[in-house]
Amino acid sequence: MDISSVIAAAQAHVTRQFELHASPVLVYHNIAHTQQVVQAAEQIAAYYRLSQQDLLCVVTAAWFHDVGYLLGERQHHEAAGAEAAKAFMLSQGLPEGTADAVAGCILATRLPQQPNNLMEQIVCDADLFHLGSKEFSKRNKLMRTEAELAYGSHIQGIDWTKSTIQLLENHHYHTAYCQTLLKQQKEENLEKLRSKLEARQSEALLELEKQEAKAAKEKKDELKAERKKEEKAKEAGEKRPDRGIETMFRTTSTNHIRLSSMADSKANIMISVNAIIISVLLSVLLRKLEDYPNFILPSIIFLTTSVTTIVFSVLATRPNVTSGRFTETDIRNKSANLLFFGNFHDMSYDEYEKGMNVIMEKGEYLYSNMIHDIYNLGVVLGRKYHLLRLAYNTFMFGIVASVLAFVIAAVFFPVKG
């Protein structure tokens, strides 16, 4: 059996398939990517000096591993590619065992990768060879573009960066050759992503502060405009208290909701930042504590700061829903606030409609409900910002204490070589 002729036939067949099924969506999973994977597979296989039979399986699997995308099987492209490769091998008169081995190599590339032998390990490492190369940034941008085209929606840069960091942290090369060759560059690529994520989160925090300043200015302008209207009405001898009251309720409710949204955004930022810090601390620093025992206490302070900050931030955003029911007695006593979902979500529509009709018939009851609603919003806001302040204070003082602890440990308690 001449393996070179079979590999050449596989190359010609796959190239022809990409030409026949050319798609503007496949900006990453295209013939260029396939050629790169084949080149990487041949490079790794040469190091291990595979037999002719094994080399045929590895290279053929590399050529067919993304053919499933051409068949419209994005979610299960590995299975589709494996079937196509197996059919091709059988058409070349090769044994079914060889065809099954090629299919197994392609199926092993499904994430999370779980190769069972050296051939499958080589194909898996070749498929993600770019994670440890200088081409990673360029290939990652193409992958994001393809995902946006395939699903027809924009992917936020910060979300894509988080998912890519998770991919690199969970991934590991299977062959000793790739572990040695690509480890350093992969770690550099991961560190660049983490730095980019921190920068984008800082930009998001700055943008949030700008929005707060803009909201404060808008509130000030609204109050100023309302005062002017009242002055004009007064000068013209007009008395329109109902309109002024409605404006007051609308403005106050809008400001409360806006402040609540800002508080949730601040809490989410603190949760994300500290989650990254904990991830880095657990994955990098804790491995070194055995060699540097003087850093144990500073690390504990650092970890405690981040965990405490996350707890306060989560408490600030944790929802609280009430029983969701009211009675006719509550309506008569004007003690039920029907404008808040927590007081009626467990009621039937007829009961709720009846209660709302009572409110609309009595103006003083309507104002009472609106006042009650605004008061409850204010109470919730007070709790949110109190917990958020505790989170920020914990983070600020904890970071300072951690840095000082690390400096003291390094200067006064150095590890003796």
Image (cartoon, helix red, strand yellow):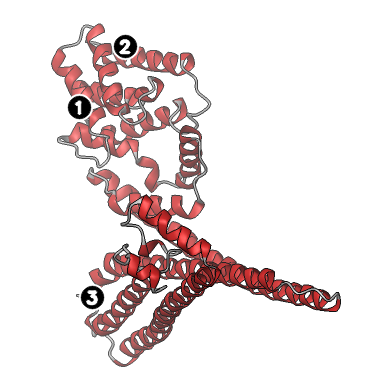
Residue that label 3 marks: 289
Residue occupying image coordinates x 45% and y 19%: 18
- x%, y% of residue 365? 49, 70
Q: How many marks?
A: 3
Q: Amino acid at mark 3?
A: Leu
Spatial CA span between label 2 and label 1: 22 Å
x 23%, y 29%: residue:
107
Considering only order in the chain, which callout, 3 or 2, is on the residue closer to the N terminus?
2
Looking at the image, which is closer to me, 383 or 351?
Answer: 351
Q: Regarding mark 2 in the picture, which secondary structure is present there?
A: helix
Q: Label 3 vs label 1: CA separation?
A: 41 Å
Q: Can the viewer see residue 200 in this picture?
A: no
In this rendering, position of residue 209 left or right of residue 287 = right
The nearer-to-camera label among 2 and 1 is 1
Using the image, tell me which numbered label, if any, was put on residue 5.
Answer: 2
The answer to which image quadrant residue 102 occupies is: top left
Mark 3 Cα shell of 10 Å, populated few (<14), some (14-19), many (≥20)? few
The secondary structure type at the circle numbered 1 is helix
Which of the marked residues, 2 or 1, is nearer the chain's N terminus? 2
Task: Name the mark nearer the viewer: 2 or 3.
Answer: 3
For disc 1, the marked residue is: 104
**Closer-to-camera residue (33/376):** 376
- State which tag comes first along the sequence, 3 or 1: 1
The picture places residue 196, in percent across and down from the top left corner, at 49, 60
